[in-house]
Structure formats: C-alpha cells, structure tokens
C-alpha cells in the first residue's frame, strides 16, 4: 500500500471498474501468485511464475503486477488482464522490495545481497542501478518530492533508512530508524515516515525534515517482530503485521498508542487495506492463508486459503479487476468504461483547493476521486462541486463523466 504522486491521465485507455478489486498474493514455495476477488474473498486465479516470488507492487493503472524473485534474480512482469507472465527482467543481487512509482512510472527494486537499487523503465524495461547502504529491503516513494526511501536489514548498526533523489538518481543521505527496519510508508503529505522495526518491536514515526524519531512500543511480549504496515485513507489508523507474535497491531496515529492487538494466522508478512477501507488483508506464510480483518470491529471475519508460503510484501491490492471483463458476469456489477477518455482536461477550481472543488460550466454525470495510493476514495453522481476537506493533503486524480466522455485531471488538496 504504498504510493505517492499520480499522473493526471493514468486511466486514459483502459476500463475502470467499480464493482470489485483484486489482491495478488505471492506464494514463495509454490512459485505462483493467487488472485483474490475482494468482493467474494475467493481465489479466482493462480498464476504460475516459477522461482520464489516474494514482494510485489501493482501498477497504478492496475494493468501490470511487478514481482521480485530471489531465485531468478529478476523482476517478473505479470499482465493483470490475461493473468499471464509478460517477461522477466534480470536485476541481480537477490531482489526483494519493489514499488511502481506513480510519480515517474518507473519500477524500483531493492537487491538485498547486491546492495543496489534498480530503476526499470516502464516501457523498455532498461535497468539502471545505484549502490545503496547494505542489505536494502523495503521501499516507499515521497508523495511531494522527487525522492524515495529504502530500509536496510543491515546498515552497519542496522538502524538506517536511505534517502534517494529520483531526479538525479543518487543516494543522498541516511537517517536513523529503529533496529532492523523492514516495512516503510510515507504519510500522504510526505512529512512523516512510518517504519516497522523488526528487531526492537517498535514502529518509528520519523519527521522527514528534522529527522526526529518517535518510537511506539508494540507490546510487552519477548518477541513481536513487526514486518510491514499500512495506513487507512484518513491516516487515523496504522496497521502493523507482527511476524513472530502472529498478530496485527492497530495504532491510533493521533495518540501514537496501540489501541488493539488482533490475533491472525502464523507468521504474518504483507499487509494491505481494501480501497473502501473496510477490510485489512494480512498474508500469513505458515498458515498458507490470507486473514481478513474488519476495520470497524477489529476482528478477523474471513480466512482465504492460498498456496504454499504466501508473502506479498508491498502494495498487493489493486483498485481494478479482470473478473468483470466478460459482459455475462457483470449483472451485479457497475462498470464505468473509460476507453473513450478525452485527453483534454476539464476545468475545476480552485486548484489547489482546501475544501470544495467546483466544475466550471457543467455538472458531471459522475465523479471519481483517486488518491495517491491509487485507491478510489470517493464516487458521486450529478454533483457540480465536491468536498475534499475530509481528505489528507496531497495530489488526487479527479475522473469526470461529462457528456459521453470520461476525462481526468490532477488536483492538489492542501
């Protein structure tokens, strides 16, 4: 779950689905990816990719899924429409963390034993590498600056987060985290980092400008081992998968305290949240299953069996689905066909805005708001203005159905 800035026309040529979303689960020992339909919470496909797939990132437009494979030293490109492998891009050095950046559309991958960060061109798949601190692991992109951050399993003192400028593609400097940082995400305004510190059972909240760090202790157990984390849409809650304790911690970001600890399956790894914010999906490796948590009750409401040793470190939930591609399957499913998107933006004002965004000269039939993580956060019909005051500051995509055409525009909420 874990993106930054999006382009204004990323949805320009493919269908946009409102009916259901999909989750992609890497099964490390089976060499497969299980595709889960989030409406039914059932596996609808198993894609054979070979090797040992571990981390993945769904592209912002939902058309591709990029997967790291330790065994082949490659990033595997999966077509999310056909559920087939397009190609494998060799990056070397045991690739692990991966992220498709909506900021520049490049694919970034950390190589754990190569001590490098690979930047992959989204069309040519050409690979460019830089050296970074030892044992790079997780990765996140700033929503406000041309930069990304990587965590490091062993950065000398094992407490390092690296800052990389994506314009000049250089490792600028390191900042201190907790002990053995793994999962990492930005706040939507780019001012804070949230880091899961595996070895000292804490989550660090780091001020990006001052580098000041606040550590939240996750509990009193001898070992908890936080692994990955995800924020809900309004950033009031932070969900953390705890690899050794077999739990998920729910942190209130205002009080900076753990308000709930939820038992899940054995050895939880990846964690992500549904686009509607109602469910958190936790990938449990030794249970061969994905546990589903209701975010209102903080209780497990479903367990989805997958294949052997699932991991899915990264943003594994897509806003889009291929389960409604066939017309005979969509009787209960609302589909907005955006194949006829006009590439000329419509007029909205003010932009940037603090609260209301008004459409000039027309009232759209429907408006969809997509946040910086690629999630559908609002959908309204026949409204001349929309209220963004409840949403965090950042960049959003406004999709509007005007006349017989869908159009997109980037707006800034501040």
Image (cartoon, rainbow, N blue to C red):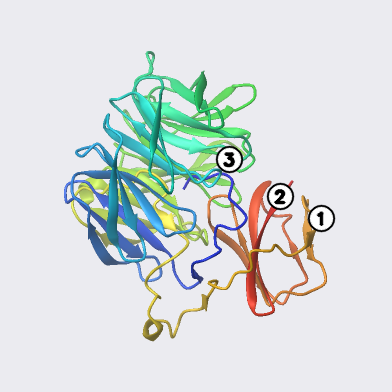
- Mark 2 secondary-structure assignment: strand
Residue under pointer 3: 253
Q: Residues within 10 Å of mark 3 (few under 14, many from 20)?
A: some
Q: Residue at x 17, y 47 (%)?
A: 29
User: Marks 1 and 3, how far apart in space?
Assistant: 30 Å
Depth check, front residue: 227 or 7:
7
Q: CA distance from mark 1 to mark 2?
A: 9 Å
Q: Earlier in the sequence, mark 3 or mark 2?
A: 3
Residue 265: percent from the left, percent from the top?
28, 49
Q: Quadrant of residue 42?
A: bottom left
| Residue 276 visible to the viewer | yes
Nearer to us of marks 1 and 3 is: 1
Q: Which mark is residue 412?
A: 2
Q: Counting other residues with Cα less than 10 Å from the Cα at mark 2, is it few (<14), some (14-19), or many (20 or more)? A: some
Q: Is 22 displayed left or right of 86 in the figure?
A: right
Residue 272 in the image: state x and y as whole percent: 43, 50
User: Relative to residue 257, is residue 393 drawn left or right?
Assistant: right
- Can you give x and y, in whole percent of width and height, for residue 383 in the image? 74, 73
Point out the frontmost of discs 3 and 2.
2
Q: Is residue 46 left or right of residue 202?
A: left
Between 18 and 42, the one lying in front of the other is 18
Whole-number angstrom distance, CA of label 3 to CA of label 2: 23 Å
Residue 277 locus on image (x, y percent): 52, 58
What residue lies at 74% left-to-right and 55% top-to-bottom?
Answer: 389
Helix, strand or loop status at disc 1: loop
Can you identify the residue that label 1 sits on? 350
Of pointers 1 and 2, the one earlier in the residue sequence: 1
Please tell me which residue lies in front, 411 or 155.
411
Asked which secondary structure carries label 3, the reply is loop
């Amino acid at each position: 779950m874990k993106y930054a800035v999006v382009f204004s026309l990323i949805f320009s040529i493919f269908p946009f689905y409102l009916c259901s979303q999909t989750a992609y689960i890497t099964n490390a020992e089976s060499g497969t990816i299980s595709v889960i339909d989030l409406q039914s919470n059932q596996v609808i496909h198993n894609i054979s990719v070979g090797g040992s797939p571990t981390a993945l990132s769904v592209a912002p437009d939902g058309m591709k899924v990029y997967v790291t494979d330790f065994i082949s030293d490659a990033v595997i490109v999966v077509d999310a429409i056909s559920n087939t492998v397009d190609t494998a891009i060799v990056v070397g050095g045991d690739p692990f963390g991966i992220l498709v950046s909506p900021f520049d559309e490049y694919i970034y991958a950390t190589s754990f034993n190569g001590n490098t960060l690979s930047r992959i061109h989204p069309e040519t798949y050409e690979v460019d590498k830089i050296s970074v601190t030892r044992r790079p692991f997780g990765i996140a992109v700033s929503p406000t600056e041309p930069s990304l951050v990587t965590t490091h399993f062993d950065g000398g003192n094992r407490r390092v987060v690296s800052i990389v400028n994506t314009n000049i593609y250089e490792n600028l400097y390191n900042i201190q985290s907790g002990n053995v940082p793994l999962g990492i995400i930005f706040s939507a305004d780019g001012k804070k980092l949230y880091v899961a510190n595996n070895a000292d059972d804490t989550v660090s909240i780091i001020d990006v400008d001052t580098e000041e760090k606040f550590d939240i202790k996750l509990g009193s157990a001898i070992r908890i081992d936080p692994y990955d984390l995800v924020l809900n849409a309004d950033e009031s809650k932070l969900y953390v998968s705890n690899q050794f304790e077999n739990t998920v911690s729910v942190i209130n970001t205002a009080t900076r305290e753990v308000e709930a600890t939820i038992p899940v399956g054995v050895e939880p790894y990846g964690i992500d949240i549904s686009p509607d914010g109602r469910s958190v999906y936790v990938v449990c490796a030794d249970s061969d299953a994905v546990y589903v948590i209701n975010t209102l009750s903080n209780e497990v409401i479903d367990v989805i069996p997958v294949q052997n040793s699932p991991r899915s470190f990264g943003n594994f939930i897509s806003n889009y689905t291929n389960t409604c591609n066939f017309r005979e399957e969509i009787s209960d499913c609302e589909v907005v066909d955006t194949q006829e998107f006009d590439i000329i933006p419509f007029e909205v004002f003010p932009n940037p805005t603090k609260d209301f965004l008004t459409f000039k000269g027309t009232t759209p039939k429907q408006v969809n708001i997509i946040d910086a993580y690629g999630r559908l956060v609002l959908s309204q019909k026949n409204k001349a203005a929309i209220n963004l005051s409840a949403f965090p500051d950042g960049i959003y995509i406004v999709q509007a159905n005007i006349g017989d055409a869908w159009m997109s525009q980037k707006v800034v909420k501040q």
